[in-house]
Amino acid sequence: MKSGGLHPIYKILFYAILVIWGLSVLYPLLWTLLDALKNNDQFFRKMPWSLPDVPLLWSNFTYVWSEFSFDKYFVNSVVVTIGSTLLGLFLAASTAYVLARYPFKGSNVLYLIYIASMMIPFSLALIPLFFLLNSMHLTNSSFGLILVYASTLIAFGVFVLVGFFKSLPKELEEAAAIDGASYFGIFFRVMLPLSQPGLITVGIVNVLNIWNEYIIGTILVNDPDHYTLPVGIAMMQAQMQYRTEWGPLFAGLLITMVPVLVVYMFFQRQIASGITAGAIK
Amino acid sequence: MRLGTTKWQRSLFIAAFILPTFLFFCLFTIYPVVQAMYYSLFDWSGSSDNKTFIGLDNFKEMIHDPIIWNAMGNDYFLVVGKIIGIMILATFFAVALTRFRFRLSNFFRSIFFIPNVISVVVIGVLWNFIYNPQIGFLNAFLSLFTKEKVDITWLGFTSHTIWMLLPPAIWAGIGFYMILLIAAIQGIPESYYEASSLEGAGQWAQFRHITLPLIWEQMKVSILNIMMTTLNGSFVIVMIMTNGGPDNSTQVMGSYLYQMAFSQYHFGYGAAIGVLILIVSLITTVVLQRLMRQETIEIS
């Protein structure tokens, strides 16, 4: 089919809109990199879009990394993101498997509870969560963050994975059962490997969400030693009122962004399918 | 089959796989939500000896709190602005990248989604720099056309500053809904379009009579989703960009909750704001669903 009766003028106009929007997305990434290589003087003397002077100030990166403790924030973010994603995935997958394959009295109600919880505004839970974690002595700790983040992943994970387990053929499980595998054996040796695509989809969506999460991180952590990257960025920006260091701030932004951009490049398809799966609720 | 032989083995397995998750979920999600409703009935500064039951007084106080009303207005402003902005652009992009067969369509699709994988904190800081009065993009750009240097404090007006938060919110939100609508459009059988082309229907007629009715279901989901995520989550960008200021003029319900609870230690009042957010989003969901009730056409 030809490109269906679209007048050339519209075609050019529409294409121009796409290009402009594309630039509006790509340019900020480029300028973050360029501005991460400038010193304050260049920010105030020159235009924001001007190129950084040579020699480029790569030292801004080492500066935020060691002086602003982004090394710690980075490690904290990695630990919290991986820990909570693995824990959340396990909790969601086990429940989803039973709900999909071994319905019991009340299993439908349980499923509905998980689904309905996705409708509840999370801001409602912020205050009690703070006091709960405080009473458990789990504020200012990466472990506390992992627990809370993992719990926020359960509902979405159950929702997507129940659908996924239901779509898998039953024959393999039956064959394994005849071979004498236990319930647990079937799950861990047969179903988990088979459900890898579903687990990866849910996992990647969760990794992005947790890596970028700010509000829970800022409420549960006051100790800079346990900040995650988004909290560190926000704190750095707040300090800018007293000492302006734009170059290092942009370096910090880049350190925060690059990992998710890399994950996105590799897992685009899974992210897209995670979105479409999650939105049909 | 051996699986059915011992019933208790099956029950044990079910319990072992259901209970840990459920208990975990109860402790960290259900319990806090119930607890929030309970806290909303107290005047409470955070310490245990300073907690007095006051019934619904927090809610009565809200009625006379001008900031709450302003915050709710801002929330709805963002909801309406984002629904209009995101739906128009996301639908346009989705149609353009599927039906118009432009070159580089897949490339554009990948690019447009990028803001959705970046933290709202990063997006807020980037847009703060765009709006920065001394060294920001916007003023520098406008200065190209004026004799004197423009130095507008974009985020400093007590009225209309909330408008400034709309572009970043829309910019950051589009990709997600575009992907959703692209999937919907790709689910429409090509034969529908071929048949209508034979009858001489142009792109606009095809959009109006084929695409739009068949993706209406996903558009409804998108609109509801924008509403819910905005009422529940827009406060992060507010906190990063304006912190509710100047003079509380850009406060939204979530940021006001945070400020009341964690800066001013009115935890009871903060919890009550949380309950308000819950009620408001439930009511808005019902109202929106009624408004959008229209025959949806299923592809058989």
Image (cartoon, coloured by chain):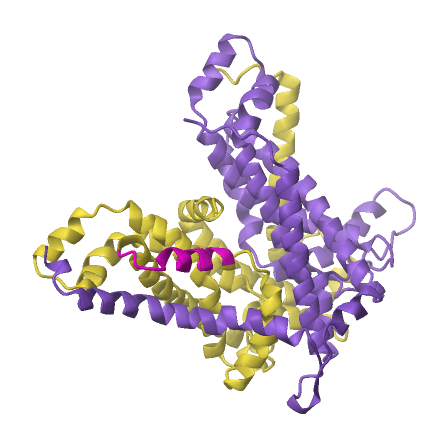
Residue lying at 70% horizontally and 67% vertically, measured from the top left = B273
Which residue is outermost to the right?
Answer: B147
Residue lying at 43% horizontally and 21% vertically, measured from the top left = B190
Q: Quadrant of residue B186?
A: top left
Residue lying at 62% horizontally and 17% vertically, measured from the top left = A8
Magenta residues span A102-116
- Looking at the rendered structure, the number of numbered marks drawn on it comes to 0
Q: Tell whether position A112 is magenta.
A: yes
Which residue is outermost to the bottom?
Answer: B49
Residue closer to the observer: B123 or B244:
B244
Q: Which chain is purple?
A: B
Asked if one can make out residue B136 in the rendered structure from this viewpoint, the answer is: no
Q: Tell whether position A226 is magenta.
A: no
Percent from the top left, x then y, of residue A254? 57, 61
The quadrant the C terminus of chain B occupies is top left
Q: Is B211 left, or right, of B161 in this rendering?
A: left
**Magenta portion: prevailing SS class:** helix
Q: Quadrant of residue A228?
A: bottom right
The colour chain A appears in is: yellow
The quadrant the N terminus of chain B occupies is bottom left
Residue closer to the observer: B64 or B89:
B64
Which residue is outermost to the top?
Answer: B199
Percent from the top left, x then y, of residue B121? 63, 62
- Compared with residue B237, is residue B115 higher up or lower down, i.e. above or below? above
Residue lying at 47% horizontally and 13% vertically, measured from the top left = B195
Residue closer to the observer: A15 or A210:
A210
Asked if one can make out residue A5 in the rendered structure from this viewpoint, the answer is: yes
Percent from the top left, x then y, of residue A239? 71, 74
Q: Is B43 left, or right, of A273 in this rendering?
A: right
Percent from the top left, x then y, of residue A214? 59, 66
